[in-house]
């Protein structure tokens, strides 16, 4: 794999050319101070302080005696043990707030290459849905996929000359609550030819998708011919698509061939062999009951959380409370 092949898969590189067939996205260049914040992996997990303070909880119930444990009297020699102050990125926060509003009030975030899917468990909804800067910061700060983008994007490149790109970008992508995970597919292109299609969600069995296998193959192949073939810079790469209810195909992402890109229901060896033999497009759908649903969990010690009014954690807990109240109302309505 070449460095150029990895670089052309950055969302800020490909989105402007393919925006008409992709989902609505706003891209922001990130300041180096925010990148440094994401890279710090020791000490308390601090979320940035909100400059708007719109989501603060002014009436949070707390015990005054708990606060005394963290107070340090003047002249104390243990001042170094005081918890560090949370960072603040007011200019970036205001830009992101404006973008979220322009995209309908909810987005999911992505850096140059990766979205923080592995950190969805820590959000108040268990998804990548974000409605505030603190939601985004929490996901990015908790994701190993994001760490890869920040520190190891070129590790698999045979011509590696850089450890990281000169600039990082945050892509805010419009959140669609009705998207069905079983209708997302990864497509494999070898020597500029579409050779394989795999169901993206491989932890569950969807009989209806299996029944539409031929139809889905034709829809995705036609989309590739009309919109992607010859338009992307690499010869070998993958791209992800979503097929809507009205049989339209939307481009979600591009990824490099091999290395950290998952082959899903294929192996890279069989994909390369298929490409060299110029065989017909191989479509693979989960064909039997194989359901795995990971549980949600939170593993952030209370002592490591700053929950003062206006803090990122304050906003996060407010969102979690609103989500819980909404679920309770839905359950009562269903009863």
Image (cartoon, rainbow, N blue to C red):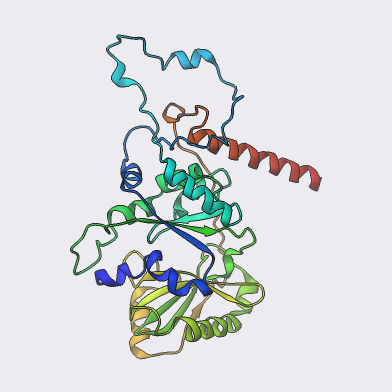
Residues 98 and 259: in front is: 98
Instruction: Please report the residue visible at 69 percent of the width from the left and 44 percent of the height from the top.
Output: 327
Left or right of 158? Residue 91 is right
Left or right of 158? Residue 210 is right
Is 325 above or below relative to 334? Answer: above
In the figure, residue 160 lies in which quadrant? bottom left
Instruction: Please report the residue visible at 18 percent of the width from the left and 63 percent of the height from the top.
Output: 161
Across and down, in percent, residue 81 comes to: 32, 21
**Looking at the figure, which quarter contains the C terminus?**
top right
Across and down, in percent, residue 203 comes to: 53, 62
**Looking at the figure, which quarter contains the N terminus?**
bottom left
Residues 104 and 209: in front is: 104
Is 107 above or below relative to 300? Answer: below
| Residue 128 in view of the camera | no
In the figure, residue 3 lies in which quadrant? bottom left
Instruction: Please report the residue visible at 41 percent of the width from the left and 49 percent of the height from the top.
Output: 143
Is 6 above or below relative to 269? Answer: above
| Residue 215 in view of the camera | yes
In the figure, residue 113 lies in which quadrant? bottom left
Across and down, in percent, residue 2 comes to: 24, 72
Instruction: Please report the residue visible at 54 percent of the width from the left and 49 percent of the height from the top.
Output: 130
Total count of labels:
0
């Amino acid at each position: 794999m070449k460095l150029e092949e990895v670089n052309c898969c950055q969302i800020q590189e490909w989105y402007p050319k393919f925006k008409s067939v992709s989902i609505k996205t706003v891209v922001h260049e990130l300041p180096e101070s925010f990148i440094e914040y994401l890279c710090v992996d020791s000490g308390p997990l601090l979320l940035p302080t909100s400059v708007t303070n719109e989501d603060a909880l002014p009436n949070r119930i707390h015990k005054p005696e708990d606060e005394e444990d963290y107070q340090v009297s003047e002249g104390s020699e243990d001042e170094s043990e005081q918890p560090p102050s949370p960072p603040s990125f007011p200019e970036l926060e205001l830009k992101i707030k404006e973008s979220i509003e322009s995209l309908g009030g909810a987005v999911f975030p992505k850096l140059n290459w990766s979205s923080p899917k592995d950190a969805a468990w820590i959000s108040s909804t268990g998804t990548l849905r974000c409605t505030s800067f603190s939601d985004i910061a929490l996901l990015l700060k908790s994701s190993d996929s994001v760490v890869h983008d920040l520190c190891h994007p070129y590790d698999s490149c045979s011509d590696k000359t850089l450890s990281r790109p000169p600039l990082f970008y945050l892509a805010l992508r419009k959140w669609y609550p009705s998207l069905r995970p079983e209708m997302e597919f990864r497509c494999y292109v070898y020597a500029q030819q579409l050779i394989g299609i795999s169901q993206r969600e491989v932890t569950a069995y969807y009989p209806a998708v299996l029944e539409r296998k031929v139809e889905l193959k034709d829809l995705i192949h036609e989309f590739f011919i009309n919109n992607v073939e010859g338009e992307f810079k690499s010869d070998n790469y993958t791209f992800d698509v979503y097929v809507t209810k009205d049989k339209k195909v939307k481009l979600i992402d591009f990824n490099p061939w091999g290395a950290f890109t998952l082959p899903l229901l294929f192996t890279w060896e069989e994909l390369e062999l298929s490409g060299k033999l110029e065989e017909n497009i191989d479509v693979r759908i989960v064909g039997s009951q194989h359901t795995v649903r990971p549980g949600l969990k939170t593993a952030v010690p209370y002592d490591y959380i700053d929950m003062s009014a206006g803090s990122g954690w304050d906003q996060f807990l407010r969102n979690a409370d609103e989500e819980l109240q909404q679920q309770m109302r839905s359950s009562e309505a269903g009863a």
